Amino acid sequence: MSKSMREGETALTFDPASVAPDAGLVFIGRIHTPWTETSECPRNGRQTDALCEVIVADEYGPGLTSLNTCSHIILLYWMHEARRDLILQSPAFDSVCHGTFALRSPIRPNPISLSVVELVKIDGNRLTVRGLDCLSGTPLLDIKPYFASTDSVPQATVGWFEQRGRPAGEAPDRQPDADR
């Protein structure tokens, strides 16, 4: 994995993966998408209509009961190929550095990502979804129903992003560096 950095970026002095685990997280399945390289992957799930498959491990299959009543779900997953060391980052679409926790970048100490996806169908422990932005083989951490009444905050703002002249929900044009 390349360790290229943009001007002003700061890396941690340790590898977060080397710290003793304390949460006991387990992967409950795998996500299969059309993308095998970071350079192919969309920046966010709203930039693609591709159908993707989520395979839930057999032992967690009973947890899918009643999920078929949901039109949209939240998937939490582990960006397994992302670097974990940058704490200050300069996004591909901005020359200013921002703290990792003020960004949606997959580069973070714990590369957990989430997507609100359309649930197209369920066949046993296989979910077909639309709206993902991860590499094929990505480990799945959790599935939750999406509640528009509580999960949507229309008045939410991301000030530094809006100062760039775009609304917070609008996707940047440039693709990230594939070697990061």
Image: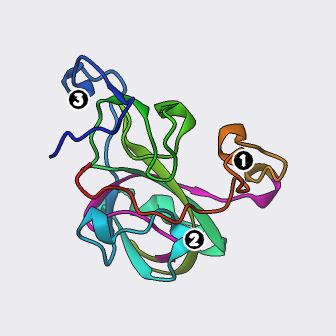
Question: For mark 2, what is the residue?
Answer: 46
SS at badge 2: helix
Q: Give the residue type that dot 1 points to.
A: Glu
Mark 2 vs 3: CB contact within 8 A:
no
Question: For mark 1, what is the residue?
Answer: 162
Q: Residue at x 48, y 33 (%)?
A: 97
Q: Which residues are magenta?
A: 129-149
Work out whether 115 lies above or below 124: above
Dividing the picture into quarters, in which one does residue 34 lie?
A: bottom left
Q: Earlier in the sequence, mark 1 or mark 2?
A: 2
Q: Give the residue type that dot 3 points to.
A: Ala
Q: Callout 1: 10 Å neighbours few (<14), some, many (20+)?
A: few
Q: Is residue 40 left or right of residue 65?
A: left
* Residue 101 at least partly seen: yes
* Residue 124 at least partly seen: no
3D distance between C-alphas at marks 1 and 3: 33 Å
